[in-house]
């Protein structure tokens, strides 16, 4: 019980420290974001922002959770075609993999629609408390300390960049040193448990979060918001290119020169002196135009690099 009390205290104090004024919360209705919103309302005015395509799981979960904790909710419904546009806009500002684009899209849209200067999120809870399903597979091997460390290293290039893009300050209560230390009193196996995040679920109940929310199963952001479904349903066409250059230096120079113009439209990587590129688009017309633009960029970049 002593461990649980310390965990509860550390989470509440971390949330309180982030409440320097009015805040917005990137809200999915799951335990992570609902607990911090539930605690934050005791210390400041809170805006809850839920993002998803129409009828998305997260929007339904967010609506029910906001009612259970008696807080108002701002719902941002995004049509599938607009998810593509938002993804491309985001990718022009950040250098992300396809999967990162899918799960960071709801956060990007929440930041874009925030009415307050601080955007709080539940980032870090899954890494710290073993929330991902892969931790619960048979013979699963994991290092939660490394999971948290790797996430912290990624924040400057993802969440921090997004919040700065919209003039906001990022708040991640679960990644406070005090919370990480309190969670460390539990073994990795205890943290994962049978359903994931067991100590966090117990702490949430102890702090008064409704049982229905505290025991909700996790659904990944890209699935819950519908961002992955939207992107995959519309990005139906693709074309792959392979360019061989005289040296690997030239191939890398071409990527560096073309990336700012084509980020969000073209995925590229270099292996030795070969540049591989994949272009995806919702229709053949867009695919052709993007491919032509990219090839023109490659041609110019190659000449300049020589």
Image: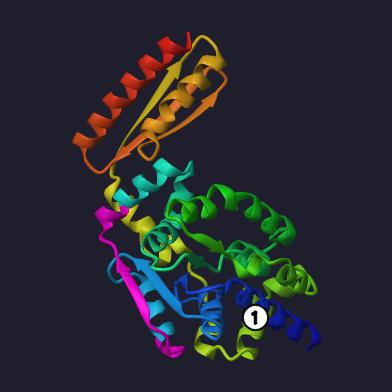
Which residue is pictured at 52% across the width and 90% down the height? 210
Of residues 80 and 47, the one nearer the viewer is: 47
Q: Is residue 134 left or right of residue 165?
A: right
Which residue is pictured at 25% across the width and 60% down the height? 79
**Residue placed under numbered mark 1 in the picture:** 12
User: Dividing the picture into quarters, in which one does residue 211 lie?
Assistant: bottom right
Residue closest to the far left: 285
Q: Circle 1: is it few (<14), some (14-19), or many (20+) Cα within 10 Å?
A: many
User: Can residue 278 be seen in the rendering of this structure?
Assistant: no
Q: Is residue 253 left or right of residue 60?
A: right
The reply to whether the magenta stretch includes residue 78 is: yes
Of residues 248 and 121, the one nearer the viewer is: 121
Q: What residue span does the magenta drawing correspond to?
A: 67-83
Q: Is residue 112 above or below residue 264?
A: below
Q: Position of residue 46 (x, y in %)?
A: 46, 78
Q: Is residue 124 left or right of residue 178?
A: left
Q: Is residue 192 above or below residue 44?
A: above
Q: Position of residue 208 (x, y in %)?
A: 58, 91
Q: Is residue 289 above or below residue 162?
A: above
- Secondary structure beneath dot 1 equals helix
């Amino acid at each position: 019980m002593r461990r649980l009390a310390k965990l509860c205290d550390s989470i509440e104090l971390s949330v309180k420290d982030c409440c320097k004024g009015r805040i917005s919360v990137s809200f999915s209705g799951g335990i992570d974001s609902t607990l911090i919103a539930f605690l934050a309302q005791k210390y400041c005015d809170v805006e809850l922002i839920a993002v998803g395509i129409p009828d998305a799981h997260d929007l339904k979960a967010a609506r029910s959770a906001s009612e259970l904790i008696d807080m108002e909710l701002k719902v941002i419904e995004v049509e599938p075609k607009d998810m593509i546009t938002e993804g491309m806009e985001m990718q022009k500002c950040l250098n992300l993999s396809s999967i990162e684009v899918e799960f960071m899209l709801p956060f990007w849209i929440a930041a874009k629609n925030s009415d307050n200067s601080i955007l709080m999120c539940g980032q870090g809870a899954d890494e710290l408390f073993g929330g991902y399903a892969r931790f619960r597979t048979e013979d699963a091997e994991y290092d939660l300390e490394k999971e948290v460390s790797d996430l912290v290293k990624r924040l400057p290039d993802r969440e921090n960049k997004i919040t700065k893009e919209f003039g906001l300050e990022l708040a991640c209560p679960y990644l406070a040193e005090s919370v990480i230390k309190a969670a460390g009193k539990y073994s990795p196996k205890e943290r994962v448990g049978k359903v994931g995040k067991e100590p966090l679920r117990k702490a949430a109940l102890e702090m008064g979060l409704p049982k229905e929310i505290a025991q909700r199963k996790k659904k990944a952001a890209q699935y819950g918001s519908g961002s992955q479904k939207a992107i995959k349903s519309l990005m139906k066409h693709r074309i792959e290119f392979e360019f061989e250059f005289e040296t690997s230096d030239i191939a890398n120079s071409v990527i560096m020169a073309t990336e700012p113009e084509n980020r969000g439209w073209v995925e590229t990587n270099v292996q030795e002196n070969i540049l591989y590129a994949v272009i995806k688009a919702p229709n053949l017309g867009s695919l052709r135009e993007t491919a032509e633009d990219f090839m023109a960029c490659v041609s110019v970049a190659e000449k300049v690099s020589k």
